[in-house]
Image (cartoon, rainbow, N blue to C red):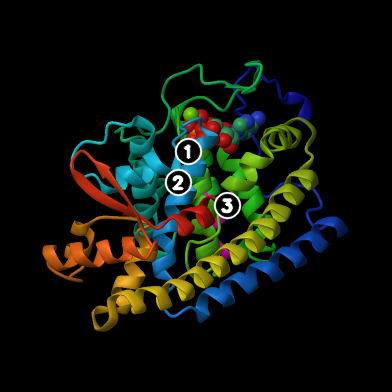
Amino acid sequence: MMEKFNKDIPYNDLPDLPPKVNLETTAIFKASINANKVLAELKGYCQTLPNPELLLNTIVLQESKESSAIENIVTTQDELYRATLMSGVIRNQAAKEVLQYRAAMYWGIEEFHKNKLITSNLMIGIMQRLRNTSDSIRKNTGTKLANPTNKNIVYTPPEGASIIRDKLSKLENFINDNAFSDLDPLIKMALIHYQFESIHPFSDGNGRTGRILNVLYFIQQELLGLPVLYLSNYIINNKSNYYRLLREVTENNNWEAWILFIVNGVSETSAMTLKKINSILQLKRDAEIKVKDALKSSYSKELLDLLFSHPYIKIKVLEDHNIAKRQTASEYLKKLEIIGMLNANKIGNEVYYINQPLIDVLSN
Ligand SMILES: Nc1ncnc2c1ncn2[C@@H]1O[C@H](COP(=O)(O)OP(=O)(O)OP(=O)(O)O)[C@@H](O)[C@H]1O
Ligand SMILES: [Mg+2]
């Protein structure tokens, strides 16, 4: 069966899930017990937070930046956050694409919550938004995947819109069908991610869409209540293994190494995310004391929250959130600058303020 695979010919024989190999080896079993444990800790921790949505804005933007970076859409933290403050056209192309990615992710999450299903249409909608295109399933021939370093062809995905649609709908069934629920969801996620990338349904944006699907799947399986866990950072740090292990599945049916890679990624990333959320909360507790001291009776919890969901902030943001009118809002921010809580900067003649310690934690 495997000898049918030829890297130069469309892989229309890509087998449907689940693969016919033992998916519960001792190594996989051990790794998934550990990953489930750390993940449950992260989920539980998020549930104890009074207002966990506040963290999302920054975590999701950071993920958008990192997931886009895998596709060589590289922006600096500064360019990106400045772009979030702009009301008009964003000139920095990479920052624009990262913000599109974030919008696609939020759209996907909202859409998913309507019926809790991860469908082909949802996948298409996410890809269209992150690329800002009306493109759908690939119709053209000739899509090939190359090694990003030496540009050698490593894989040719299935070709023909009807074959692609068919494989995608089989994947959709596998994701949403409880008949497969005796498989550990983390193992299932590894299978799904491989399958989606191997179908490679779009002419571009498959990697980024696939990474958004991972987080939707965590939510669907109730492994997380909120979209806070992302593998992009792990993938960036282990990029060549990521590409190699995808190929190992196709070429050698080596599912174990791939599953271990993903499941261990979940452990590592959950632990890192827990630490990060902890550091943010610690910063916020320190800031609370400083802000209260500087603003006295004008202090509000809403303002403090805003400083932590918008690491780059300007007067308008305070106005938009009904913290204060323009003049007063401006005084608040100036006071916070004076005590060293925020750093002032300018775009054109508009002042904006940076919560630098928060930026440092986010980009660790
Ligand atoms: N040998 C392979 N088999 C299956 N999928 C692969 C293979 N090599 C790479 N991929 C997947 O293809 C993705 C790249 O595809 P594409 O350029 O369409 O996505 P993207 O979102 O634009 O890019 P990127 O994933 O690099 O950010 C990779 O991220 C990876 O998930
Ligand atoms: Mg691409």
Say which residue label 3 marks. 364
Say which residue label 2 marks. 64
Q: Position of residue 128 (x, y in %)?
A: 34, 38
- SS type, badge 3: loop
- SS type, badge 2: helix
Question: Looking at the image, which residue sits at the far right?
Answer: 26
Say which residue label 1 marks. 68
Q: Position of residue 44 (x, y in %)?
A: 58, 77
Type of amino acid at the residue the image marks with label 2: Ser
Type of amino acid at the residue the image marks with label 3: Asn
Q: Main secondary structure of the magenta part?
A: helix
Q: CA distance from mark 1 to mark 2?
A: 6 Å
Question: Label 1 crowding class (10 Å Cα cut-off): few <14, some 14-19, many 20+?
Answer: many
Picture quadrant where residue 40 is located: bottom right
Q: Is residue 38 magenta?
A: no
| Foreground tag (2 vs 3) | 3
| Foreground tag (3 vs 1) | 3
Contact, CB < 8 Å: mark 1 with mark 2?
A: yes
Q: Which residue shows up at 43% across the image and 28% down it? A: 138
Q: CA distance from mark 2 to mark 3?
A: 16 Å
> Which quarter of the rendering shows the N terminus?
top right
Nearer to me, 149 or 291: 291
Q: Does mark 1's beta carbon lie closer than 8 Å to ligand 1? A: yes
Q: Which residue shows up at 23% across the image and 59% down it? A: 317
